[in-house]
Image (spheres, rainbow, N blue to C red):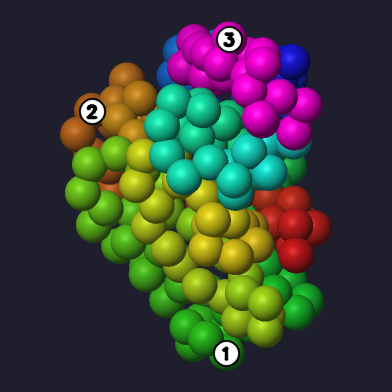
Amino acid sequence: MFILIQLPYASDALEPAISAQTLSFHHGKHLQAYVDNLNKLLPGSEFEGLPLEDIVRKTPAGPVFNNAGQILNHEMYFTQFRPAGEAVQAPTGTLAVQIDKQWGSFDAFKADFEAKGVGLFGSGWVWLSEDKDGSLVITQELGASNPIVKGLKPLLTFDVWEHAYYLDYQNRRAAHLSALWQIVDWRIIASRR
């Protein structure tokens, strides 16, 4: 049985980037529904008892994949944030070096990441991941997909489903993506490598 993750911050701690109202719906309603749905689908299936990552890797599509993928994606999404005053807002160490090597600067990386998020048609996720050789890659994943299905190690994600931003930003996806940088804690992103 999977359970809804506890957030490592108060419901209003991410404002103004993410409002308490959005967080309440996004975490408490949307993510809870994915958890409930997956728990109903797993008993008696070949996926019962497997960790989320294995379910997502082994399930090509369908309701089990969609719900497991959304849980995995949302858990990574919600746990990468800290209040703006607590978050380390830029990468350091080898991650910063790799970003500078591949994009030329952190600002250029952010611009590319945001552009890929804005350019994703429909619902999904934009990801920064690491490949087996240590290179970084930005991918657009539709629906509930996760870069692990491509053999990548996911590090950072922004949710571009409308439920992630519509209450706060309406149809201004770009403004939502830009605001998220102030709450990304790069210590967490680096720890995922």
Residue in front for this viewpoint, 96 or 140: 140
Q: Secondary structure at mark 2?
A: loop
The residue at which mark 3 appears reads as: 40
Q: Quadrant of the N terminus?
A: top right
Q: Which residue is mark 1?
A: 101
Please name the residue shown 67% across and 44% down the image: 53
29 vs 69, nearest the viewer = 69
Q: CB of mark 1 within 8 Å of CB of mark 2?
A: no
Distance of mark 3 from mark 2, alpha carbons?
32 Å
Q: Is residue 117 above or below residue 28?
A: below
Q: Is residue 92 magenta?
A: no
The magenta stretch is 29-50
Relative height, residue 55 to residue 24 (above, below): below
- Please say if the residues under marks 1 and 3 sit with CB atoms less than 8 Å apart: no
Name which residue lies at 52% across and 63% down. 150
Three-letter amino acid code at disc 3?
Lys
Q: Quadrant of residue 135?
A: bottom right
